[in-house]
Image (tube, rainbow, N blue to C red):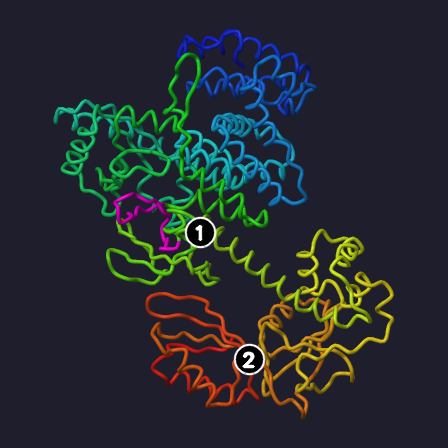
Amino acid sequence: MLRQYELVDRVLDYDPDANEALLNRAYVFSVNAHGTQKRANGDPYFSHPIEVAGILTDLRLDDETIATAILHDTVEDTVATSEEIERIFGTNVARLVDGVTKLSKIEAQTESERAAENLRKFLLAMSDDIRVLLVKLADRLHNMRTLHFIKNPDKRKRIARETMEIYAPLAERIGMYEFMKEMQTLAFQQLEPEAYESIARRLQQLNEGDGDKIAKIGKGLTQVLGRAGIDAEVTGREKHPYSIWRKMAERHISFEQLSDIMAFRAIVPTVEDCYRALGIIHQRWPMVPGRFKDYISTPKRNGYRSLHTSVIHSDNARIEIQIRTPEMHAEAEFGLAAHWAYKEGKVRADTNHSWIRDLVEILDTAATPEELLEHTRMAMYQDRIFAFTPKGELVQLPKGATPIDFAYAVHTDLGDQAVGAKINGRVVPLSTVIENGDQVQVLRSKAQAPQPNWLNFAITGKALAGIRRHLRHKERDELVALGRKIYDDIVTRLPAPIGADAIQPALRRLHLPDETALMAAIARRTLSDVAVMEALMPGSAGADLPPLAPQSSAISIKGLTPGVAFDLAQCCHPVPGDRIVGLRRPDAGIEVHAIDCPVLSELAERGTDETDWVDVDWGDKSVGAVARISVQVKNEPGALGVIATVMGAHKANIIALRLDTRDAAFHTNTIDVEVHDVQQLMRMMAALRATDAVNMVERI
């Protein structure tokens, strides 16, 4: 553990203007506050925050950040308070300590909820001051270094999994690759101990067999570049065990088949020297096709810059070479912290990172912990490609992204209003995969809104979050509208008229916050008609009430007790002639489903006892029902008129029509149509397919 003077001297070495008194006060306060507390390995607890501070001095961070690291556990684990921290150390340090403290106070019922809540607080605090992230990453790194002292194996694995899924990707996103690699290696050791030991053992055997092979190759690279007049500092290393294991899994190969396990770094004086060195290396050794990446002209999203190439060295060994300047190397080692500048004892940071803004926006749109984790991991993990706006602005996207992802990456409003796209000047569907270097123009309309089928080809967390947010709001609006219609019918069945002021007492009796919640509950049938009537007019449910009109008086079902209510299922829309089955759910009536309905298959697979199956068939008086079909029509005048004409000729009655998607070539409509039986429906669909205006028809 660093002694007090050693820690202070470290900071003063790179920042002579640092507040020495602040650091000394923080050190003494932490030691006194933690007192006799012990860590799992038996060390004094205050050794942990001191070591975290030591890690951050390697990043040359400011005195407030170092003080925060020293104090970061005092509010959570001792009797110290936030007010006390602010009084002694000032507002800035107190705010940073509070930000780090909030990340640790996680109490949730499930692991996913805990991880999601942790991530939510993390991102909010990080967006306020990026130094919170740096302290927390150093805190997690030191905890991972001492993780093996925790006796509970389940707890070790939970911490390791959280590190692998959240903290290592965040370290990568701000360019702190050394943090990322060490976290991944330590987490991998806990999550896959046998694989880790196997790879570590084989690396050791390889070193013993090849001797100083890495040193020899590095010396040869230095000489080749030196003869061309380039002063290069070349270092080499083996790739870390987790990186090797991941490559083995991705390529489905064994350790012996993996050829590129050595990586070298050449640091040269200027950007021009980077490209000169690349040419010299490619002249000397054959390049591995497809393995060259220019992150200098097109930096990674976290600002990382370097040239990457792989060549075939002696004995057919593949080696990876990274070429960069000293400035690029500092950014690669320290990431975001390398951009920090000291002035008058205070630190500034460029926190204008688009991925941070995207993650914070995702916080506002995720409906569940699982959705938050899904969207955030998408925003952090995927490999990137580069596309351009018509004005030449660079947009970074994950591989497999489509114009919908591009649109949301530019701006949420553009994503919401997208109706089509042009890639390199050619009109393409919104589902088209963007290639590296494409120019993308998104066509928009204020009349457009996100469509459900966009979820099938959007892949970025930001796009999926935006689409799902809109669909939830739309579903809520439709649900409330349906509930309002049912409510109006319930009101007409009351024995006497009621005034507008009757609804507020009813909401109190039903323990609901507002009318919207009431209408949604009515539509979902979580409230019965009787319950609503009693709430509106106590005692009314026992009165002689007029019967509620049936949904379709022309439909009868065999196999049900006379008078038992039933509904035709909205998931499969059965019509007379379909093979059907009844489904009785607890506290609900009978639902009539088509025999091939996916809902029935799901229930059968689960083997649930919560439902009863009822053998039913269409009655003799069943003379019609509503079917639902999807029709893809050419986007041209008169196309819908053709559809209506065909349906009218087949004596089918259009009940409802909804436009689902629309682009330059086609628009897709969902149509509810009343037919006598399934034979009539099939004849009508065949006639629609035969017309030039229709591209596709299918039953939903």
Q: Residues within 10 Å of mark 1 (few under 14, many from 20)?
A: many
The kind of secondary structure element at disc 2 is strand
Q: Is 556 situated left or right of 434 in this image?
A: right
Residue 447 versus residue 410 in the image, above or below: below
Q: Is 329 situated left or right of 501 in this image?
A: left
Residue 199 versus residue 129 in the image, above or below: below
Mark 1 or mark 2: which comes first in sequence? 1
Picture residue at 41% right of the left edge, 50% below the top: 408
- Three-letter amino acid code of the residue under disc 1: Ala
Q: Which residue is mark 1?
A: 463
- Report x, y in % for residue 413: 42, 50
Any magenta on residue 397?
yes
- Report x, y in % for residue 131: 48, 25
- Report x, y in % for residue 3: 53, 9
| Quadrant of res 603 | bottom right
Picture residue at 67% right of the left edge, 93% below the top: 620
Residue 537 versus residue 691 in the image, above or below: above
Q: Is 29 situated left or right of 145 in this image?
A: right
Q: Is 311 situated left or right of 590 in this image?
A: left
Query: The N terminus is located in which quarter?
Result: top right
Q: Which residue is mark 2?
A: 627
* Tally of numbered tags: 2
Residue at the extreme bottom of the image, as rendered: 620
Residue 290 versus residue 275 in the image, above or below: below
| Quadrant of res 327 | top left
Q: Which residues are magenta?
A: 384-404
Report the disc number at residue 270: none
Picture residue at 58% right of the left edge, 18% below the top: 71
